[in-house]
Image (cartoon, coloured by chain):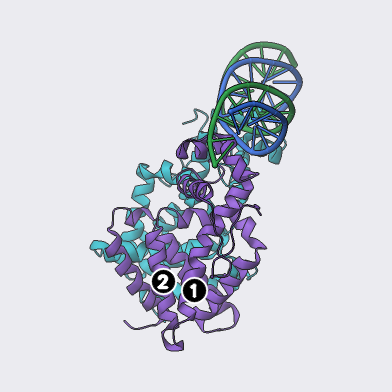
Chain colours: A purple, B cyan, C green, D blue
Amino acid sequence: MSPSKLAALHEPGAIALSGAQSRIITAALDLFARHGVGGTSLQMIADEIGVTKAAVYHQYKTKDEIVLAAAEAELARLQAVIEAAEAEPPRKRRDALVTGIVDLAVDRRRTVGTILRDPLIVGFFADHAAFRDVMHRQRRLLTGGEPGPEGHVRTAMLIAAISGAVTHPFVVDLDDDVLRGQLLRLARRFLGLSP
Amino acid sequence: MSPSKLAALHEPGAIALSGAQSRIITAALDLFARHGVGGTSLQMIADEIGVTKAAVYHQYKTKDEIVLAAAEAELARLQAVIEAAEAEPPRKRRDALVTGIVDLAVDRRRTVGTILRDPLIVGFFADHAAFRDVMHRQRRLLTGGEPGPEGHVRTAMLIAAISGAVTHPFVVDLDDDVLRGQLLRLARRFLGLSP
DNA sequence: GTCTATAGTGCGATAGAC
DNA sequence: GTCTATCGCACTATAGAC
């Protein structure tokens, strides 16, 4: 990882970025969502923030490093939501997580779906320790540790439903608040929580 | 469209491909799923089927034409499922569609999710008449024409849940039959169909 | 941290023979 | 339908000045 990373924040796994780095990652996430990871060049990222390619290379040695840092920045948001849910009393944890995931998905509705489903990023995360840890804790909170295929499929469907629905053509011109409310209601019903 | 297209099949919208064309589209779909659309070059497609780039260009004048044809080939599968469901008696239509979509998603679990969510293809389909028609009929069958945001969000979530769950890391090493059974059961429950 | 300049590679696409 | 050969271009990446 880049030597210019600052000390980690209090959240484990969260990564502090310099000003120049966060400008790059913000621009990259926006462009990845619009053109895909493979369809985004360093020139496009440099143009977006008004510098040259060489300035971008000074922060990240390769394009892969940018892709990984961008994906980790999005993962850190999910991680924060999970940690907030884990801090709740046991009874409230599941609902807190669902609410947090819906809020996050709606808040990042232009980027989330496209980024975390890109083949390159899926490959990056396949053996990524922090990613596997986040997924495991997410599943435990959502299914209460329910073993076997049932819990896996149920969790995969809920996550896919929320993160996928926000980018679906059916809801593109739906207001954020309306979308959030409907998603939360239907997600709770899917889990068998309160009506 | 390419002048070498043969006559359309009896299904409206289905597109017949020559032998060389279907080899290209099959290879392209596989590579798109593995590397993304932007991360797949014509050279990779040519290598995959053992010909040169020029041979590929003889079938499709640009890369965009290949991407569009590949996306339409996947769309045609969904179209066939919808038409089969519409041919059922009214009472059975919704369940027939859900079953068909689950079968299709599991059958194409390596390609479906990645292809139809790629930014380039989403852009192609945004103003694509056949795509909009398929989406409209799908929603009508699933929600019974339920108006307003509720029907839109509910349909978007179900489609995203099914097509997204099949590629989720949680279920990668799950057997096709087990996955199909769980998906179908949970999808029915989400719609309020039979237990 | 940003710049100019450039090396080296692979890209999409075309021409023309078989 | 496939080939060889090639063009012009955009790409990733690096070197070195400011």
Quadrant where the C terminus of chain A is found in the figure: bottom left
- Residue matched to label 1: A82
Across and down, in percent, residue A16 comes to 54, 59
Residue B13 placement (x, y as % from top left): 42, 44
Secondary structure of the residue carrying numbered label 2: helix
The amino acid on which the numbered mark 1 sits, given as a three-letter code, is Ile
* For residue A157, above or below residue B194: above
Q: Residue at x 58, y 66 (%)?
A: A13
What is the CA distance from the residue labelled 2 to the residue labelled 1?
8 Å
Nearest the eye: A137 or A145: A137
Closer to the camera, B183 or A10?
A10
Q: Is residue A24 above or below residue C14?
A: below
Q: Say which element carries label 1.
A: helix
Residue in the foreground of this view, choosing between B95 and A178: A178
In the rendered image, residues at marks 2 and 1 fall on the same chain = yes
Q: Residue B163: give x, y in percent of width and height.
A: 49, 61
Q: Which chain carries label 1?
A: A
Q: In this view, does A81 lie above or below A62?
A: below
Mark toward the start of the polypeptide (2 vs 1): 1
Q: Which amino acid type corresponds to the residue marked 2 in the rendered image?
A: Gly
**Coordinates of residue B154 in the picture (x, y in percent):** 34, 66
- Per the rendering, the mark at residue A100 is 2
Residue at point 49%, 67% (across, down): A78
Question: In this image, B187 relative to A39: left or right?
Answer: left
- Residue occupying image coordinates x 65% and y 63%: A128
Compared across the picture, whether B49 is left or right of A151 comes to: right
